[in-house]
Amino acid sequence: MLPIQADKAMSLLIEERDEAGNLTAIYVASASSDEKGKTDGRVDIIYPEKGDTIWTRLLAIFLPAGYPHSVTEDYMWYQIYVGVGVGDASASPTTALLLSILQESTGRVATILFADRLGTALEPECKMYRLAADVFNDAAMLLDCLSPALPRGSRVLLLSSSSVLKALCGVAAGSSKASLSAHFARWGNLGELNAVSQHTKVKYPSGLISAKKDSSQETVISLLGMLVGSVVVSYVSSPAMTWTCLILLLSVHLGMNRAAVRAVSMHSLNRQRANIVFSTYLDQDKVLTPKEVSLQERIFEWDGVLRWRGSSPLAKGRIGLSMQDLLASLAPAHSRTGSIRDGEAKIMRLLRLYSQEDFLVWYDAPHRVGHISLKEGAAVGQQLKAWALTLWIAHRHSMGAEAHATGASFESMFDLHRATLQDLSSRWPECVKRMRSAGWDVDVACLETTSGSRIRIQSR
């Protein structure tokens, strides 16, 4: 760690890089004291020249975050050969119809945008997106059934919306299924678990889409369902009975899938599970097991919300932020130059406070937002500690448990951060040890749901 010491005149250089290691910004923080002891500081922001072209920016949408450093060397060639080999044997001239083209295009565009926007969040929130995929699929089925009753113009819009929902279902189901399979494979038998899966062809108005079933056991259940359905359909003759059966079966489908997702006890700590584990430990000195946490966690949870033992939302936590986002919560930036006038040298004091940590945390009390910036090389344990610190600060401020927590001035908030950091640091080694014993995997990073930034601090 870089020691940060108080001085009459001091300047620090902070480099910010993305997950691929590319330089995104340089912050020059300076502070000085006059003869009377008054401290004055400022932060200047320098942005590197952008060498990206429109082509490279467009290409980045189709590549994983951090490419090429986040994948192996053979990733690109594999994708190229697979892409060239993909074809549809059932293609016919009818696919050139305008409606089919529109549906196919909207579905594919939705797939690209959804994967680019939420691709990083699919693994940490695999339970939520697994159930969301079923919701998307059933909603698309309802739209398909409603389309014949609408005029032609509305029908086109409805079928295009259905294609979008099916595309979202494919992305969410495929990614979440991979994460769940990795969770289930205790003996390193991930290939065997995937081997019992099969590809079935589900016919949509836009053509044939390959949909991977959860397992071969589910395929057997699907076959039984078709046999029962062939008997039931002979007794369903009226539209009212048809819609009644459809709504009933879709409700049963969603209910069973909800029960299946709730039965899964993940061993990694995403944001919601981290809230439950840390709040219980800090409040009751008890570490819950993954099974106990699964009974308390919500399937659908607001992104980044901070809750204390399942209470109402305290605030919102944001991790992996750029330095500029954190600075914006401390002092306003100049409208033209972008430099930040830091009259109280807030950033310098914050850097000294976290000089022995791999993160910077600041809780913006007026807006109820916890900002977390990670330093370069921050391990998973440090990310978890930063989240636990943010949660505890938000709880103490809301409850007024500390004398300095009742106000929102910088001095009172800084004292709150310092006291909470000291309290957490004294309990953190034991907390990590007990979490491992309870069955938690504290070496897997599941807190960041978007591509984050990392900072490097240097003295000048």
Image: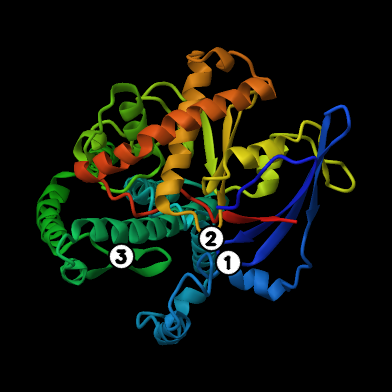
Image quarter of residue 253? top left
Nearer the observer, 250 or 275: 275
Closer to the camera: disc 3 or disc 1?
Answer: 1
Residue hosting label 1: 61
- In the displayed structure image, the side of residue 156 where residue 379 appears, left or right: left
Which numbered disc, 2 or 3, marks the residue closer to the eye?
A: 2
- Please name the amino acid that badge 3 sits on: Ala
Name above or below for residue 312 compared with residue 442: above
Q: Residue at x 45, y 47 (%)?
A: 382
Image quadrant in which you'd find residue 88: bottom left
> In this orientation, does residue 314 appear?
no
Query: Disc 2 or 1, which lies upstream in sequence?
Result: 1
User: Where residue 139 sits in the image (x, y, percent)?
Assistant: 38, 46
Q: Could you tell me which secondary element the residue under label 1 belongs to? A: loop
Report the number of discs: 3
Whole-angstrom CA distance, mark 3 to mark 1, is 23 Å
Residue wearing tag 2: 116
Please tell me how crowded label 1 is: few (under 14), some (14-19), or many (20+) other residues with Cα within 10 Å: some
Q: Earlier in the sequence, mark 3 or mark 1?
A: 1
Q: Which residue is mark 3?
A: 211
Q: Nearer the viewer, residue 383 or 115?
A: 383
